[in-house]
Amino acid sequence: EAQVTQNPRYLITVTGKKLTVTCSQNMNHEYMSWYRQDPGLGLRQIYYSMNVEVTDKGDVPEGYKVSRKEKRNFPLILESPSPNQTSLYFCASSTPLGRAKNIQYFGAGTRLSVL
Amino acid sequence: QKEVEQDPGPLSVPEGAIVSLNCTYSNSAFQYFMWYRQYSRKGPELLMYTYSSGNKEDGRFTAQVDKSSKYISLFIRDSQPSDSATYLCAMSVSGGSNYKLTFGKGTLLTVNP
């Protein structure tokens, strides 16, 4: 079964305590992305990766880091979380955008609260 | 002007109605256009994907892209209560050199039995 798995699903932490949200996909997709979703602001892309060791910034990369050492994994790192990073986070994997077809899967989400 | 504008609704229709959801955009370089459905407390799922202008149909869903007007639409025929969800549009400039996606804020749709 095609899956994008995020962990943890829920996390409450305190300002400044480093955390990592893991993301793993089992479809051998080249593209992976991280998004945050906030009321009134919609879904915004944080970082994306087009292949192993290839990452780039989305619209809201400040305060986040990513790495893509293996094709299946794309962790999101918050080195020093702040309350404005309280949000719902989604990881997604995808085939490359092309003319004919595109396949995308999203994880179930990670709800993060930074106190 | 925001890059992608989408009326947040909410939109409430009776079962069986034809639903029209729309997004406008300002960046004429967008080439890839997508619609997602997101149920409450779930991740988005890709519903329709279109490259450049034209129509695409999949069952009860039709996606239309009018690049000259910078306007995209999603039509849902014979709407069902199970279509009740938030619908998000998204766009990308280029699939080859980057994978930057820009989303609308989403439209909340309720289909009443």
Image (cartoon, coloured by chain):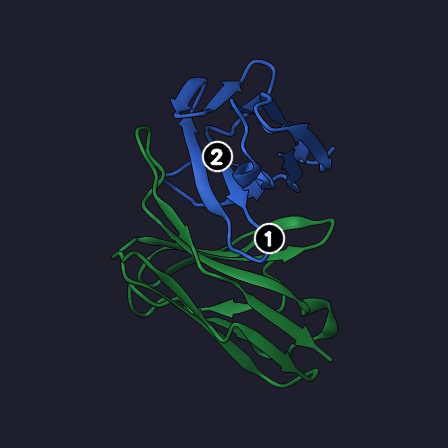
Q: Inspect the image, locate mark 2, and give the three-letter code of the amino acid beneath it.
A: Met
Residue A58 visible to an observer of this rendering: yes
Q: Inspect the image, locate mark 1, and give the three-letter code of the amino acid beneath it.
A: Ser
Residue B7 visible to an observer of this rendering: no
Decide if residue B54 is on the left or right side of residue A46: left
Q: In the image, is residue A55 above or below residue B24?
A: below
Decide if residue B21 is on the left or right side of residue B1: left
Q: Name the residue carrying label 2.
A: B34
Decide if residue A45 is on the left or right side of residue A68: right
In the rendered picture, chain A carries what hue? green
Residue for point 44% across, 45% down: B99
What chain does mark 2 sit on? B
The blue chain is B
Decide if residue A23 is on the left or right side of residue B42: left
Q: In the image, is residue A21 above or below residue B92?
A: below
What chain does mark 1 sit on? B
Q: Name the residue carrying label 1.
A: B40
For the residue labelled by badge 2, is the local secondary structure a helix, a strand or a loop? strand
Q: Position of residue B36 (x, y in %)?
A: 51, 40
Q: Position of residue B75 (x, y in %)?
A: 54, 23
Query: Any mark on residue B16, and which?
Result: none
For the residue labelled by badge 1, is the local secondary structure a helix, a strand or a loop? loop
Residue for point 64% across, 37% down: B109
